[in-house]
Image (tube, rainbow, N blue to C red):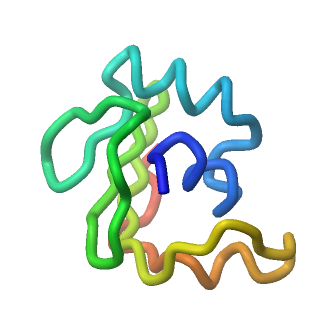
Amino acid sequence: MRLDKYLKVSRLIKRRTVANEACDNGLISVNGKPQRASYDVKPGDIITLSFGARTLTVEVLVVQETVRQADAATLYREVSRPQA
């Protein structure tokens, strides 16, 4: 699954267009490298999201095309807490 779609399905970012722009601006990295929105996400990947002064790092556990909002958090595990 594409990185921008995974970020939307997992509810880490609300809209796919915002996820796409974040990738284009270098705010999203996978396994320590900035990635494009077309990157193919796999279980075990470490995704880092940087928004302003906050950074969130998660590990991909499952890749699914659709998921209910209540179950979205089961797709990933937080590796580090957001820092303010």
Residue at figure coordinates x 69%, y 58% from the top left: 9
Residue 75 lies left or right of residue 32; in this view the side is right
Up the image or down, 10 lies above or below 23; here it is below
Up the image or down, 48 lies above or below 71; here it is above
Up the image or down, 49 lies above or below 70; here it is above
In this view of the protein, which residue sits in the foreground, 53 or 36? 36
Question: Residue 42 placed where, x, y %?
Answer: 33, 69
Residue 61 lies left or right of residue 30; in this view the side is right
In this view of the protein, which residue sits in the foreground, 59 or 84? 59
Question: Residue 43 placed where, x, y %?
Answer: 35, 77
Residue at figure coordinates x 85%, y 79% from the top left: 70
Residue at figure coordinates x 27%, y 77% from the top left: 44
Up the image or down, 24 lies above or below 77; here it is above
Residue at figure coordinates x 22%, y 33% from the top left: 34
**In this figure, what is the number of numbered marks?**
0
Question: Residue 6 placed where, x, y %?
Answer: 56, 55
Image quarter of residue 17: top right
